[in-house]
Amino acid sequence: MAKKVDSSFKLQIPAGQANPSPPVGPALGQRGVNIMEFCKAFNAATQQVQPGTPTPVIITVYSDKSFTFETKTAPASYYILQAAGKKSGANAPGTQLVGKITKDQIKEIAEAKMKDLNAVDIDGAMKIIEGSARSMGVQVVEG
């Protein structure tokens, strides 16, 4: 028989750096989950990802206090800012530009994010990433 789902929630944790401090500890502790067990499992699952990369994770807690989790790829904004070599996006997008990225970089980001995007093909995924870049004040150039 399938386990009964008690709750499901999302967190964003740096890859390989899960520890019992906030936001992980309080989020899991109030649901009665073994915090250190989650931290060890998450850190093991994100070993192949560059350390410190923000990693969205969906945690499902069952009625017997066991859990499962699913990691996603880093947010598109993280990849866009890395490609542009910037720390943050524009304060006034549309009027302020903070950097430039090329179509080739957009394609690399789209390929990395493809499984988490709502796109049928790579062209659709590229358009989604381009829109994210524009809304951050990053100009997309040919090249």
Image (spheres, grey):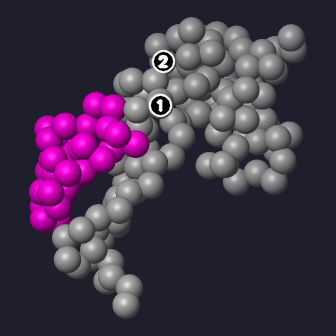
Residue found 78% across the figure and 15% down from its top: 102
- The reply to whether discs 1 and 2 touch (Cβ–Cβ < 8 Å) is no
Is residue 136 something that shows in the picture?
yes
Q: Whole-percent x and y of residue 60?
A: 34, 65
Q: Nearer the viewer, mark 1 or mark 2?
A: 1
Q: Is residue 130 magenta?
A: no
Q: In the displayed structure, would residue 134 be above or below residue 1?
A: above
Question: Label 2 sits on what residue type?
Answer: Ser
Q: Please provide percent x and percent y for residue 125.
A: 76, 42
> In the figure, 86 relative to 45: above or below?
above
Q: Return the residue at label 2.
A: 88
For the point 19% across and 56% down, the residue is 28
Estimate the spatial distance between the alpha carbons at disc 1 and disc 2, rounded to whole Å: 25 Å
Residue that badge 1 annotates:
48
| Quarter of the image where the C terminus is located | top right
Q: Nearer the viewer, residue 136 or 91?
A: 136
Q: Position of residue 112 (x, y in %)?
A: 66, 35
Give SS at disc 1.
loop
Q: Is residue 132 left or right of residue 40?
A: right
The image quadrant of residue 30 is bottom left
Quarter of the figure that contains the N terminus? bottom left
Question: On the picture, is 10 further left or further right than 72?
Answer: left
Can residue 13 be seen here? The reply is no
Q: Residue at x 62, y 49 (%)?
A: 116
Residue 39 place in picture, x, y as percent: 24, 44
Dividing the picture into quadrants, the one containing residue 46 is top left
Q: Residues within 10 Å of mark 2 (few under 14, many from 20)?
A: some
Q: Characterize the local packing of mark 1: few (<14), some (14-19) or many (20 or more) Cα atoms within 10 angstroms.
A: few
Q: Which residue is painted at 12% across and 65% down in the image?
A: 32
Image vertical order of residue 24 relative to residue 30, above or below: above
Q: Is residue 115 left or right of residue 54?
A: right
Magenta part of the chain? 16-45
